[in-house]
Amino acid sequence: MRLDRRFVLVALLCATLLAQAPPRMPAEGSERAIEEQFLSVPDPRQAEQHMKILTAEPHVAGSPGDRKTAEYVARKFREWGFDTEIVEYKVWMNYPAEVSVDAFTPAGAIMHGPTKEHVEDDPFQDDPRVVMPFNAYSPSGDVEAEVVYANYGRPEDFQKLTEMGVDVRGKIVLVRYGENFRGVKAYMAQETGAAAVLIYSDPMEDGYFRGDVYPKGPWRPDTGVQRGTIEYGFEHPGDPTTPGWPSTAEARRISPRDSPDVPKIPATPLSYRDTSPILQRLGGAESPREWQGALPFTYHVGPGPVRVKLHLKQDFGYRAIWDVIARVRGTRWPDEWVIAGVHRDAWVYGAVDPISGATAMLEAARGIGHLLQSGWRPKRTIIFASWDAEEQGLIGSTEWLEQHEKELESAAAYFNLDTGASGADFRASAVPSLRGFLRDIAKSVPSPKGGTLYDAWRTAVRRENSPTANPTAEPQIGTLGSGSDFTSFLDHSGVPATDIRSSGNYGVYHSVFDNFAWYKKFGDTNFLYTQEIARVYGLQVLRMADADVLPYNYEAYGKEVAGYLDAAQKSAAGQFGDKAPKFDSALAAARRFAQAGAAINALVAHAPSRVRDETRSVAPPLSLAGFERQGGDVERLNRILLATERALLLPNGLPRRPWFRHAIYAPADLKGYSASTIPGVNEAIQRNDAATTAQQLEALTGVLNRAAALLEGFHPASSELFVLRAVPTGLR
């Protein structure tokens, strides 16, 4: 039978439209099907295309290239169905105008620098828009003085120089990268009376001592320089002229000269090519042997006979930066925000830091957008945030947070990415309440190595620690310190947070060589680990946004804090002897917190659920309908769970740095990136201050009891199943 031609055309058109239409949403309640649909979307080829575009030109914060990346990210978010805005702040920042470092001995000149970053074969190094190596927030200055070598520039290193009879006052201090945040190095040089500081990359940390250098291998070549901020972010991150409030166009400001966050002496970074002739000719005593780096001569501490003439001219001003904020409103709890953030600005191209993270976020957002197009809507509001000026001092995220502090009181989580993938080894950090949640996510994501990410993660961690380690042990999740955009959310506002990455041999950090060519050769050649990170990242967002009851584990949190207190008690005994403050009340409060958390865990574990998955190490999502039918008040339970992390905030903040308010976590004072646990207590012990230790123990006890009381206050009605009991936790 001959078909009518018009019928055939209509049929072909319908088939084409059906093929192009997004798949229909799985039936209500099919969480696993929704997750599988999401996991099918992130794509290595798409990730590579994002990276090519975002690393096409240098894009230091506030530059024209930076604005282009903001527009690209915003355009993609809009394509995928998100309500998107570009939020502008005006912040105090500098670019370098003139930098020269000249070294002399009595015999004459030995170095005129800095040498241009260059290797034999790199397609990106000669772009005229590449900003010369500099330290953000270094003041301008002209200094000529003798040089003193101070190892890593830690407090103990300056103390060692004093013990050796070396006076750094009026000298130019030379320190190497590593062990602490570069801003701490500048701060210690300033506080000990130095006139200026030079910060160099020693090949022991990330150069030829580690392996072949770029372009043959992944490690830093001799001309490579690590740019970076020296703002005193361990006091307060963000714009130093608006400490505690957002840098909007009409914002009041303090003078940069009056800001405690801005260094007072000039600083600049150097390559190990430029540093080598300085170090080689230093006199004075031999350095302590643990201060010896990998350059092929014996290090001495000076002072002199080498003198350096340093000339820095900085171009400071109030400059525009651009956060890109994309959101989809939640259907049931729109005021409970699930925030996923990655910074976008880079010192030069930033292929690893941060564009590998930014591309993973884009693919995660594309996966969520795919669900939106098929009719799904989250129960909580989802926000994807592309931060700006992170490199200068977590500025974009901090200013946005300070503008939205009230709304963030009910934020459910902040999920961070930064250097998304520089290799194949998965790593994670999180607050204790989300560690089980994160491990469960890893059990649902396939690994490029075969099996699940969880399997590969556990195997890698066991191999690194000990071949004979327990094969069933959980992979360890680290503690959140600082150095990325989770800092303000957790440490100031008490938003539960995680941070994930996939690590490798990454030796070109903050240099011109962190570009697309390096990434394709040494980072993630096929973008499979970028895809893996995108899946983990997006699945965190998806599960948190749709959880009927928030998946926090406060039993684990309380046990962790008890462990911190045990360690601090031993430190206090060693420091103060029989005059050490008593820890009994704080330990009892930590046990109470853990027991209250255990009771909530028992409630959730025994409640009906639409999803039963025995691979999960924490209870699966609690069925809203089943819970409410048996008398549970899910709205009230979620409010209590949200309030519990905030209950751990100190009303007056930490001693000496009140902007940091979390009683359990802060960036380590005079270390920077590493975490300080129960910081008020531990830092008082380190300062040999028994009175402040006792006062901070009392404050810590108060917040732990407050958090425990919140959890204990939830008593669902009617059903015996929902009567909370104290559950044994094994705590002593």
Image: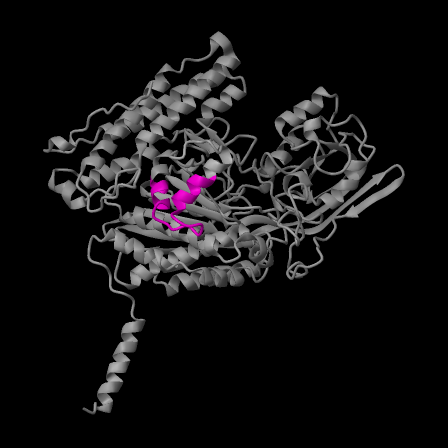
Residue 133 visible (yes or no): yes
Question: Which residue is at a point 70% across and 55% down the rendered structure image?
Answer: 119
Question: Which colouring convention does the figure follow?
Answer: one colour
Quadrant of image for the C terminus: top left
The location of residue 667, given as percent across then percent down, is: 50, 34
Instruction: Give whichever of 711, 171 is nearer the camera.
Output: 711
Q: Is residue 110 left or right of residue 493?
A: right
The vertical placement of 62 against 568, above or below, is below
- Nearer the observer, 456 or 581: 456
**132 relative position to 729: left or right:** right
Range of magenta residues: 437-460
Location of residue 416 in the rendering, given as x and y in whole percent from the top left corner: 43, 46
| The stretch drawn in magenta includes residue 451 | yes
- 158, above or below 542, in the image: above
Which corner quadrant of the image does residue 310 belong to? top right
Residue at 33% from the left image edge and 61% from the top image edge: 370
Q: Is residue 26 above or below residue 507?
A: below
Residue farthest to the front, as pictured: 468
Name the residue rendered at 52%, 49% in the picture: 423
User: Residue 63 location, x and y as percent?
Assistant: 57, 58
Identify which residue, 231 or 130, lies in the foreground.
130
**Where does residue 204 sit, x and y in percent of width and height?**
66, 38
Q: Residue at x 58, y 56 (%)?
A: 521
